[in-house]
Image (cartoon, rainbow, N blue to C red):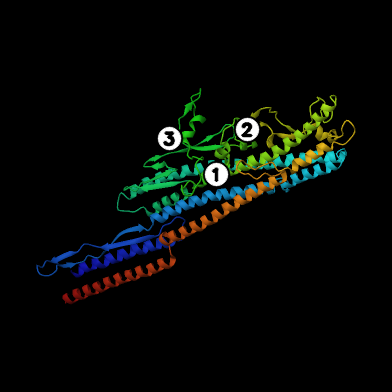
Amino acid sequence: MSLMGSLYLGVSGLQASNNALNTTAHNMSNLDTTGYTRQQVAQDTRSYITISKSQTTSWQQLGLGVRYSQTRQVRDYFLDKNYRRESGRSAFYEVSHNAMEEIENILGESYEGHEFSESITDLWTAVEELSKNPTLAVNQNLFVTRAYEFITRASAVYDSLCDYQNNMNALVKTDVDTINGYAQELEKLNREIARIEGGPEHANDLRDRRNYILDELSKYGDVTYTENIDGYVSVKFEGVDLVKGSLVNHMSLYTDPVTGFHTPYWEMFADYAFDEFGNKYLPKESLESAKVFDLKMMISSDLNTDLGSLKSILLARGDHHATAQELKDVNPDGEYEKGWYDINISQSIIMNIEAEFDQLINSVVTKINSILAEAAEAETKLYPDSTYLRDKNGEPYKLFEQIIENDKSYTLPDGTVVECGWNVGNLQINTDLRQNPTLLKFRLHDSSEDNVTMEKLKNAFEESIYTLNPNVQTPVCFVDYYKNLVAQVANSGSVFADILDNQTITVDSLFSSREQVIGVSSDEELTNMIMYQNAYNASSRYINVISEMLEHILTTLGR
C-alpha cells in the first residue's frame, strides 16, 4: 500500500478511538441517571484489498483499517423478566403490609389517643359496679355513660376504616392514570425507535426510557411483552393487550353510584349503553366481562396471581363497607348467599376487619338490649300493669337505638333469625336514658333489686360464644374477641412483613445482578477511557510517522 493509503489507516483508527471515547464519556456522564443502560462500542475490520493472487501460496492482501460499527446496549432478557416479575410481587405485598400497619394504628390509637379496648373494659367495669348496687343513681349514670363512650369510640374506629378505604380508592384512580400515561408514552417511543433505527443509527437512549417504563409498569400488575423485528414492543397487562403496534387499549374506571369505589375496566371490552340524552355510560351488569382484574382468583405465587400494587389495592380495599351480617353469608341486600364471606369478604384485608369489628359491636348492643327487654317482659308477666324498664309508650327500653330504623330481618338455613340495622354506623344511645339514666332503676315491683338482670349482664361479658369469622372455631367472650381481633391483625401483619422482607431480598439480589450487566462502572469506564486514549495516541503517532516519511521522500526527491 502507498504511504498516502497508509494515512487512511491511521485516520480510521483516529475516528474509531474518538467515537469510542465519546461513548465512554456518555456512559460516565450518565453514571447516576435512572434507567440508563451502559453502552458498548462495537468495532470490526474494513474490507481487504487484494494485491495479487497466487496459485501455490496465499493471497497478498492489505487491510483498510478499523470501522466503528455500532454502539450497543448490554441487557440480559431473563434478568429483566425476573426482576420485573419479582418487583411486581414485592409491590403487591408492600400494599398488604402497609394496609395492616394502618389498621393496627386505627385499632390502637383511634379516638383521642385511647385504645378501643379501654372502652370495652370500661363498659365491663361499669356493669360490675352496677351489679354491686343496681339502684344507685351514680352506677346507673356510669353504665349509660360508658355505653355512650363505647358507641362513640366504635364509630370512630369504623369511620377510620372506611376513610382508609376511601383513601385507597383514590389511589386506584392515580394508578390507572399512571398506567394509561405509560401506555401512551410506550406507543410514542415505539414509533420514534422504529423511525430512528430504520437508518444506521441506534435509539439507545429511547430504549432506556422504554425499559424504564416497563420496569415501572410491572409494579402495577402482571406485565408481559415481546419485541418485533421493527423494534416495536407489544405489552400485555393482566393478559390483555395494553400496547400493540399503534394501538393503545385505554383503561377506564367504573364508579359505583352507592359506594363511590372505582373499578378498572378495559374500554375495548365494554358494552356501553346510552341514556335518554345520548350520553354513553357503562351499565353495572356489563362491567364483569370488561374488568381488568379477576379478584375472585386464589392468590398464589405459584399461579403468579400476587403481582402488582393496583391489584393489591383493590383486594385490600374491597368493593364496599362490610358489616357483621356478611360473616353469616348474607349480602348487603339482605339475601343469603352460601359462600358469600369466603368469596367476597375474606380476601379483602379492610372489609374482613370491618365485618369482624362490626360483629363485636352488633353482639354487645343486641345482647344488652335483649337482656333489658327480657327483664321488662318477665316483670310484666308477674304484674301486667308494670312499667318496669318501659318507656312512656309501654315499650321495653333499648339502651342502644338505630339512627335509621330498619325492621328487616333474615333467616339463616339453620333457622337463626338475624335483625338488620344494628350496625356500628347506625347506632346511638337512647336519648331518654342519656338524659336521665335513673330511668334504669332496676328496682322490681316488690322493691327488691333486680339481681337476675345484673347476673345476665355480667354473664353477657363472660360467656364465650362468639367467633371472629366462620373459619375460626374457637369461641371467645366480648373482651377476648377484641383481643383476638387485634392479634389476628398483628399476626397477618407479621406474615406480610416476612413475605415483604424475603421479596425485598430477592428483588435487591436481582437488581444487583442486573446492574452488573447494564450498570455503569466508573472504574471500568475509566479503564476504557485510558485504553481508547492510548489507541487514539497510537493512531496519531502512526500518522505522524507516515507524514514524516512522506516529507522525507518529497524533500529528497525535490533536490
Residues at marks 1 and 3, CA–CA distance in whole angstroms: 23 Å
Task: Identify the residue shown where x is 64% and y is 29%.
Answer: 410
Quarter containing the N terminus: bottom left
Mark number displayed over residue 414: 2
Residue placed most toward the observer, 310 or 405: 405
Instruction: Choose mark 2 or mark 3, whichever is in front.
Output: 2
User: Looking at the image, which is closer to me, 348 or 371?
Assistant: 371
Q: Is residue 496 left or right of residue 154?
A: left
The residue sitting at 52% across, 48% down in the picture is: 92
Task: Check disc 3 and report its element: helix, strand or loop.
Answer: helix
Q: Residue beneath label 3, please? A: 268
Image location of residue 180, percent across then percent down: 47, 42
Q: Taking 145 as reference, is 397 above or below it?
A: above
Residue at x-position 58% and y-position 42% = 346
Q: Is residue 321 visible?
A: no
Which of the numbered marks, if any, corresponds to residue 313? 1
Question: Mark 3 is on which residue type?
Answer: Met
- Between 554 and 121, which is closer to the camera in this rendering? 121
Nearest the eye: 454 or 183: 454
Q: CA distance from mark 2 to mark 3?
A: 46 Å
Measured Cα–Cα span from mark 1 to mark 2: 36 Å
User: Horizontal placement of 292 versus 357: left or right?
Assistant: left
- Tag 3 or tag 2, which sits nearer the N-term? 3
Sequence-first tag of 1 and 3:
3
Specify the amino acid type for callout 1: Ile
Residue 296 pos. (x, y %): 51, 40
Marks 1 and 3 in Cβ contact (< 8 Å): no
Crowd rating for badge 2 (residues with CA inside 10 Å; few <14, some 14–19, many 20+): few
Decide: few, some or many residues near mark 1? Use Cα within 10 Å; few <14, some 14-19, many ≥20.
many
* x, y percent for residue 195: 33, 47
